[in-house]
Each structure stands twice: as C-alpha cells, then as structure tokens.
Image: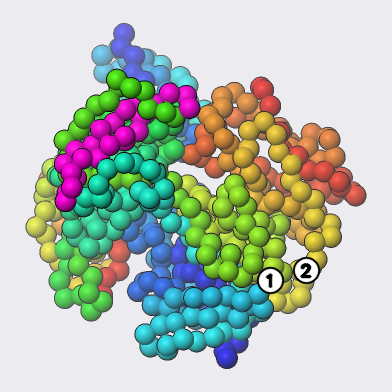
Amino acid sequence: MENYNIVIIGGGPAGLAAAVSAYDAGERSILVLERDVNLGGILNQCIHNGFGLHTFKEELTGPEYAQRFIDELKERKIEYRLNTMVLDISKDKVVTACSKEDGVTQIQAKAVILTMGCRERSRGSLNIPGFRPAGVFSAGTAQRLVNIEGYMPGRRVVILGSGDIGLIMARRMTLEGAKVLVCAEIMPYSGGLKRNIVQCLDDFGIPLKLSHTVVDIQGKDRVEGVTIAEVDSRMKPIPGTEEHYDCDTLLLSVGLIPENELSRGMGVELSPVHKGPVVNESLQTSIPGVFAAGNVLHVHDLVDYVSEEAKAAGKNAAAYVRGELKEDESGEIPVKFEGGPRYTVPETIDPSQVKDQLTIRYRVGSVMRDRKVNLYLDGERVLSRPRKVMAPGEMEEVLLTRKMLDEHPNLKSIEIKVEDS
Amino acid sequence: METRNLTCINCPLGCQIEVKMEGNEVVSVTGNTCPRGENYARKEVVNPTRIVTSSVRVSGSETGAVTVSCKTASDIPKGKIFDVVKDIKGVTIPCPVHIGDVVKADVAGTGVDMIATKNVV
C-alpha cells in the first residue's frame, strides 16, 4: 500500500486550491486524484467569463481560472493522477482507487480532503409525466455537448429552472443558432445570479416565467413539445394556465446536489439541509483528519469562494498532519441562526482554533429585503451589516474575527440573526 | 425625460438602477450602492458592450480534443455579438493551442481579436 500524508479526492477548483494551500503550509506529501482526463473539473466546460472577479480582480473564463491553479500546482510539483476513480475511502483513511494504468490501488492517507464537487438534479427527481423521449438534457450535459464535444443538442429549446447553468446555456444555445423559447422557474424568484439573468436572458429577449413549471412533455422518440403552467403558492399547477411550446429540446437547470457517496460510505455525518458533510471551524468533518471544501460541502455560486474555502481546508489538513489541530469535539460551539439562514458552514466553531478570522457562509430560504445581519457572541451584538436584498440563489457570509473572540472569553453562544432594518 | 431601469451586473448584489436621460445625456443615476454601479449604468445606456465567449474546432489534438474555447480579448459593442459568432463559424485551428493565441484577428471588424482561453495539445 502507498502512503501519502494528504490525499485530495477530486482535481477541480476546490481540490487544486486545497493542494496548493497544503503545500504552501509546508506539506510535501500530497496526492490529488482526478477521474477525468484533465485537471480543472467543471470549469473546463464553463467557457463563459466572469470567474475570478474576487480572486484575480479580472474577469476570466472557466478554463483560464482553472489554468491559474493548475499552473500553481505544477510549479510546486504536487503529484496528481488523472483518469483515476476513487471507489471507496475507509474510516481509517485507506483510499481505494482504480485506473486503466494502475488497476486497483490502495493509498493510506493521514488526512483526506473531500473535494468531489456536485451533480445536477435529474429529470427523475422532478416527477414530470410523459414518455422518456430523447431531447431532455440537464443543462450541464448540454453545456458539455456544445462546449467540449462540439454538438448541438437541439434547435428549439425550453429551459426548466433558472439556475445559473440553465441561464448560461440559454445564451450559449442562442448564439449557436438555436431558438430558446422560454425559461420557466417554479419558484417566485430566480435561483440564478442577477448578471446571468441580465446578460443571458434579457440581452436576447428570452422570457423568464416565474412561478411556472413543465406539466407535460410530448413526443415518444424525440421531444416534440412541452406544456408549461403557472403554479400556486403551494407549487401546484393552476388549471387553465397551460401554454404549449413546440420544441425539440428541454433543458433542466433544477438544482445541484453535493456528491457525497464516498463521504457517506466512510461514515461522515452529512447535513440534511446543504447535503454536504457537517464541518467545524477547520472544515473538518465528523471523522478527524477528513476535511471537505467546495461544492461537495455546500453548493456555491462563485468559484472564488470555492477556492477560498478550499485553501482553508488545505491549510488545516496540513496542520492536522503536523498534529497541530485538536481532534476531539470539546470546545465546539454550535452556530445558531434565526430569521433567514437555512444553514451555516461551519456548523460548529471552537474559538481556540480560529486564527485571524473565520468566514461563516450561509444561504437564506427566501428573498428578503432591507434586513440587518447581526452576529451575537454570548448575546452581545458584535457585528451588524445592513443588507438591501438577500436571495436563496446568492450565498451570504459573516466574518468572525479573532478580536471579537478575544473580547468574549469562555464563549458559550454564537448566533447569527437576520433582523428588520 | 426618459427613464431606464437596469440591473447592475458588477457583483452579486444586482442593484436596481434607475437612469434618467435627456436625449443621449444622462441626467441622474440612482439605486446603485457603489461607483461601479454608476459607471456601469452610464455606459450601459449609451454604449453597452459585452465580452463574447464561444468555441471553435481544433485539428490534430493529441488528447482527442475537438474544440477550444475562446473569447473576445476585450468587450465589443453589444449589437455586434451575433456578427462575432458568425465570423468564427467554420474556423478550425491546429493544435497545440495556448491561452491567449489569436483564433481570429479583428473578429467581425470590431478591431478586437478572438483569443483562445484553454491550452489544448
């Protein structure tokens, strides 16, 4: 069996940033395992621009953003293996992987960083009646076909769901000569970023129908049309509001789910809300020495924050290997929240483990206007940030600083409250 | 006086900006939270521009890649988006391709080059 101090599962943006950061923290025994033929993960097919505004202060495309981190990885001569699929990780951190070249191999790790990313929700999870004709694609599949494989999935397109990938594909398909008829969103608000609604729908006159969903797909061998209807406040289709669209393609952009089969297999505790591992301030999961970052932990909207989170995970994993990270759960304070957030990452914080500052990330459950996000330590308000608008599609954050913690020794409670302005 | 309502795209905040115009002159910009919003709004109502991203075919790839992604090296007038896409239709470039390589010079007469955004060998 091979031995590495840190094994990183997945060579997408999170895995790359984690590897670079672990190296920069002094760790030299690092291995990145990637199942695809290239490093970079999903960024390779995200050829649109807008990545890296926060990290590099410029607008890069997905492949360019990935390349910056791939270059950093290669400059440091960090080991990685492509075409290598991780099959299993044991509780004792034995990673079982397979590849064409090496067959099945086992690697004993001291620390594991989970950076497997996420997957798209599929048609199967939507309960749309009708046959199963060709022409129903997840938006990400269509993105891969158009941008990497060079195929057009169809000519007349309806998009269900207004997630960012769906919006991006509305523009991409339009530019490649398809007619995108409508984008239907079951919720009364869009799950996508504002800039994507403006630049991918508004720019091309594609209507966004909020509180609408697909109630029927016609066609047996190939999609021939879809029926869209308005839904009521309980998301039930309203009879009489049906509209028919002749089309050959239906794209689904209906949400992303962290891909945690491996985490579940090794017994890592998962959050029922964000569907990723429950983590503490060090991004350490319920198994000591196992860390998680990026979309496998909770789905992000901006890759910049994925990189930032993964850097923290890499640094913490290196500290764990050196024996500098505490292993037990004592001192962990649960982060409580009220008035808006659906979850927080991390779920618990041990103040003694926070170095300079800690970013607490969360998402709200509905669109909220003119609120204040207040952070309370032992009931005392230490931070108050006015927010004009918050939406479920856009991740929020609160910064907890060392200074705040130092001013509250023997801390018992950490609470984020979203309150009226 | 004409009023134009815009959604600022500079950051995830997505401020709703109201621009009041007298002919082609901007009279007032309200609703933005930062100077970037005002700059965006002033430009968007008078001369809207976009970066266009797409992909073109490659030949002779060792890894079996069939396309390389590309973008306009800087933003081009919004009204020229379809001209740019049309102009790179049918373009095939030989491997290896590096980030920044020119895929099509002066694309659609915009004075801006279409450049590769991926390394393909």
Residues marked 1 and 2 touching at CB (< 8 Å): yes
Secondary element under disc 2, as helix, strand or loop, is: loop
Query: At label 1, which amino acid type do we have?
Result: Gly
- Residue A359 on image: x %, y %: 66, 49
Q: Which residue is mark 2?
A: A327
Residue A147, image x, y percentages = 25, 57
- Decide whether residue A228 is among the magenta residues: yes
Badge 2: residue crowd in 10 Å (few <14, some 14–19, many ≥20): few
Q: Locate residue A40 relative to residue A107 in the image: left or right.
A: left
Determine the residue located farthest toward the left in the rendered image: B90
| Residue assigned mark 1 | A289
Compared with residue A206, is residue A120 higher up or lower down, i.e. above or below? below
From mark 1 to mark 2, how far is it between C-alphas? 8 Å
Quadrant showing the C terminus of chain A: top right
Residue placed at 63% from the left, 38% from the top?
A341
Give how far across and how far down residue A373 sits, in percent.
67, 33
Q: What segment is highlighted magenta in the picture? A: A211-234
Instruction: Name the quadrant containing residue A292.
Output: bottom right
Q: Which scheme is used to colour this image of the protein? A: rainbow
Furthest residue toward top: B1
What SS does tag 1 mark?
loop
Which residue ends up furthest to the bottom in the rendered image? A1
